[in-house]
Amino acid sequence: MSILDRIRRIAKANINWFLDKVEVPENELESKIKEIEDTIVQGRESAASYGAMFRRLENEQDTLKKQQDELISQAEQALKAGDEVTARKALTEKVKIAERITQIEPGIKQGKETFEKLRDNLIRLQTQLKEAKLKLRDLQARKHSAEAQKAFDKELGRTTGVGGSVSFERLENEVLQAEAEVEIRQEINSDSMSDQELAEKSRHFQIEAELEALKDKLDSDNKN
């Protein structure tokens, strides 16, 4: 199967039924993504080859047409000077050039059509690749969420003590700590936060900490 046929087959395939399946095996989706990526790479190489071919022939065609115009001008000048021999030679070369132009025109047409088909199908493949990758990220996120929930349920079961009592206070503290860490990381890693804003936030935390320490010291002094 040629690369053009392969690209056309994949591009025309209705990938929506595959992506819309409730449960798509992760390895199956990764395999589909790999197939599309490999096909896109081969398709780009073929498109570059066809594009170079028909554009080279187009450049040759332009050059030959300019030569034709020059030969016609030479033939006219020769006739004006009464030199039919030179005029006939120029026209002979013009006819040969016309034959060459006729020979390369089908190649130009075919190469251009093939290039345009490859380009259009590659665009469709790139859209399919994007959709497949989004589906894979969704599957992976759901998988990680399920694993996290499973781990949490296991931890919750482990913390069940004698008599069925559960250390909810410790769990709550762990959750609050984790949420606080996530919040701080998001603020620190925020793309919109400048170095100046980071410095001001750090300064704010330091001032608040020193203020609390000073309050504790004053309270201690008053008690004494």
Image: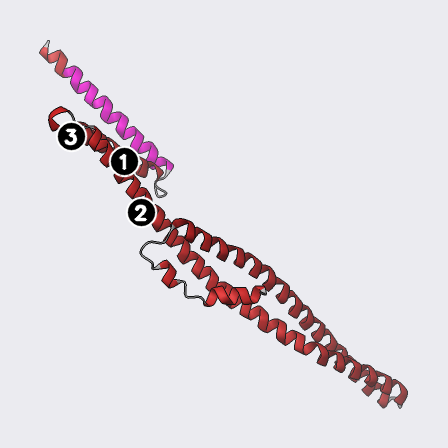
Image height of 199 relative to 115, above or below: above
Instruction: Give the Cα separation between the discs numbered 1 and 2.
Output: 14 Å
| Amino acid type at mark 1 | Ala
Residue located 19% across and 30% down the image: 171
Magenta stretch bounds = 195-218
- Colour logic: secondary structure
Rendered view: 69 above or below 21 = below
Label 2 sits on residue:
142
State the image coordinates of residue 166 (x, y, percent, origin top left): 15, 29
Q: Nearer the viewer, residue 212 or 99?
A: 99
Which mark identifies residue 151? 1
In the image, residue 23 sits, relative to residue 61, either above or below, namely: above
Instruction: Look at 74% across and 76% down and name the residue there.
Output: 64
The residue beneath circle 3 is 168
Q: Contact, CB < 8 Å: mark 2 with mark 3?
A: no
Horizontal side of residue 124 vs 65, given as left or right:
left
Q: Amino acid at mark 2?
A: Arg
Give percent across and percent down for residue 107. 67, 74
214 magenta-colored: yes
Circle 3 packing at 10 Å, graded few (<14), some (14-19), many (20+), is few
Q: Residues within 10 Å of mark 2 (few under 14, many from 20)?
A: few
* Image x and y of residue 108, in percent: 65, 74
Q: Residue at x 19, y 22 (%)?
A: 212
Q: Amino acid at mark 3?
A: Phe
